């Protein structure tokens, strides 16, 4: 009981101190005023520093550790029966492929680009070869 009262009192004190600090700061500049125009350079970065776009890649891949459940069914590898630790490939032609730890690859028709986009993180690296990408993902 006393811990909660003490925690609330400390929170109120911190809020008051933060409010007092905000009151002591000068006013922020007016955000409704138009920003000064800056002339955009046609080639901001030299070509050797350009990052390839998603359209330049042959496909995307991600690691999927847990069992892959599609339509209330756990997917297993037709070659070895593995059901975990997949590499999911999303190819340029909108096809989805699964690769198990043993290297068996099979097309998965139950997945689509929307599923991949919901479950994958941001693209953090582009690999020149498939082998380098697999090595990066631990396969």
Image (cartoon, rainbow, N blue to C red):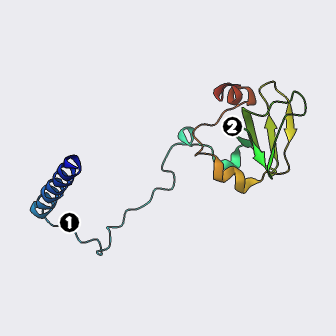
Residue 70: x %, y % from top left: 79, 49
Residue 71: percent from left, percent from top:
80, 53
Tell me the SS state at disc 2.
loop
Going 32% across and 73% down the picture, which residue do you hit? 34
Residue 135 located left or right of residue 33: right
Examine the rendered structure and indicate whether residue 66 appears above or below residue 109. Answer: above
Q: Position of residue 110 (x, y in %)?
A: 83, 51
Which residue does the numbered mark 2 point to in the structure image?
A: 66
Q: Residue at x 73, y 35 (%)?
A: 87
- What is the x, y in percent for residue 21? 12, 57
In the rendered view, tell whether residue 122 sits above or below residue 37.
above
Task: Judge by depth and name the residue closer to the eye, 7 or 23.
Answer: 7
* Residue 111 in sight from this viewpoint: yes
Give the residue drawn at x 84%, y 36%.
76
- Quickly name the residue at label 1: 28
First-in-chain label (1 vs 2): 1
Question: Which residue is at a point 82% across and 26% down the rendered structure image?
Answer: 103
Task: Label 1, secondary structure: give it.
Answer: loop
């Amino acid at each position: 009981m006393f811990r909660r009262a003490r925690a609330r009192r400390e929170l109120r004190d911190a809020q008051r101190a933060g409010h007092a600090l905000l009151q002591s700061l000068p006013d922020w500049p007016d955000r409704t005023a138009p920003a000064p125009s800056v002339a955009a350079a046609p080639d901001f970065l030299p070509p050797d520093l350009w990052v390839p776009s998603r359209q330049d890649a042959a496909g995307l891949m991600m690691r999927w550790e847990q069992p892959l459940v599609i339509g209330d069914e756990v997917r297993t590898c037709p070659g070895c029966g593995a059901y975990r630790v997949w590499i999911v490939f999303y190819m340029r032609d909108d096809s989805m492929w699964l690769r198990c730890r043993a290297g068996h690859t099979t097309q998965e028709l139950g997945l689509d680009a929307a599923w991949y986009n919901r479950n994958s993180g941001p693209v953090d690296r582009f690999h020149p070869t498939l082998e380098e990408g697999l090595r990066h993902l631990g396969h």
